[in-house]
Image (cartoon, helix red, strand yellow):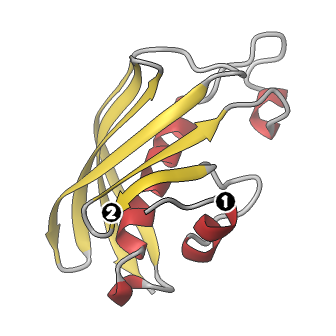
Amino acid sequence: MELNSDEIQRILPHRFPFLMVDRITDCEPGQYADGIKNITANEIQFLGHFPGKAVMPGVLMIEALAQTGAVALLSEEENKGKIVLFGGIKNARFKRQVIPGDTLSLHCEIKARRGPVGFGKAVAKVGDEVAVQAEISFAITD
């Protein structure tokens, strides 16, 4: 399943300036999602992070991964119209700066679930280089 920005916004509640996924390139509802975030110089975070040397904040890369995983979860019929909240972030490792002009490839795989709570493994890359990887936990709620 592929989704464009309009289709993503029918699933996720996020909007500008906090929608961090431009396209879903593949998705198996409840299992995983792959997406992309095109990093552009005109994004609001670059006004202050950092003037003269724009670097994508690590927390926003993690957010992009979480939103990608949320698409996989909220694509399930029983979760339509709900939201996904962060439960935690473990073992986050930032390995590469991400700057305007980069395309961040996002992958989030749902590894385990217990009721509305679950755990995912996520990685974001620029080309073949890992930019960030982390384990995330989440809760699905109304």
Counting from the top left corner in percent of width and height, residue 21 is at 59, 50
Q: Quadrant of the C terminus?
A: bottom left
Task: From the top left corner, tell me how far across and down residue 20 is, in percent.
Answer: 61, 48
Element under disc 2: strand
- Compared across the picture, whether 112 is left or right of 13 comes to left
Left or right: 16 in relation to 61 = right
19 vs 29: above or below: above
Q: In terms of image quadrants, where is residue 28?
A: bottom left
User: Mark 1 — residue?
Assistant: 5
Q: Is residue 46 left or right of residue 1?
A: right
**Which mark is in front, 1 or 2?**
1
Asked if residue 1 lies left or right of residue 28, the reply is right
Query: x, y percentage for residue 73?
Result: 35, 70
Residue placed at 71% from the left, 63% from the top?
A: 15
Give x and y (percent) for residue 67: 49, 56
The quarter of the picture where the N terminus appears is bottom left
Residue in the foreground of this view, choosing between 49 and 109: 109
Which residue is found at the position 63% from the left and 49% from the top? Answer: 22
- Label 2 sits on what residue type? Phe
Q: Is residue 21 above or below residue 114?
A: above
Q: Which mark is residue 117?
A: none
Nearer the observer, 36 or 63: 36
Disc 1 versus disc 2: distance between alpha carbons? 23 Å
Q: Residue furthest top?
A: 52
> Is label 1 in contact with label 2 (beta carbons under 8 Å)?
no
Instruction: State the mark number for residue 138.
Output: 2
For disc 1, the neighbor class at 10 Å (few under 14, some 14 to 19, many from 20) is: few
Query: Quick one: 139 or 109, which is closer to the camera?
Result: 109
Say which amino acid is labelled 1: Ser
Query: Considering the numbered disc 1 on the image, is that residue within a helix, a strand or a loop?
Result: helix
Q: Is residue 109 above or below residue 91?
A: below
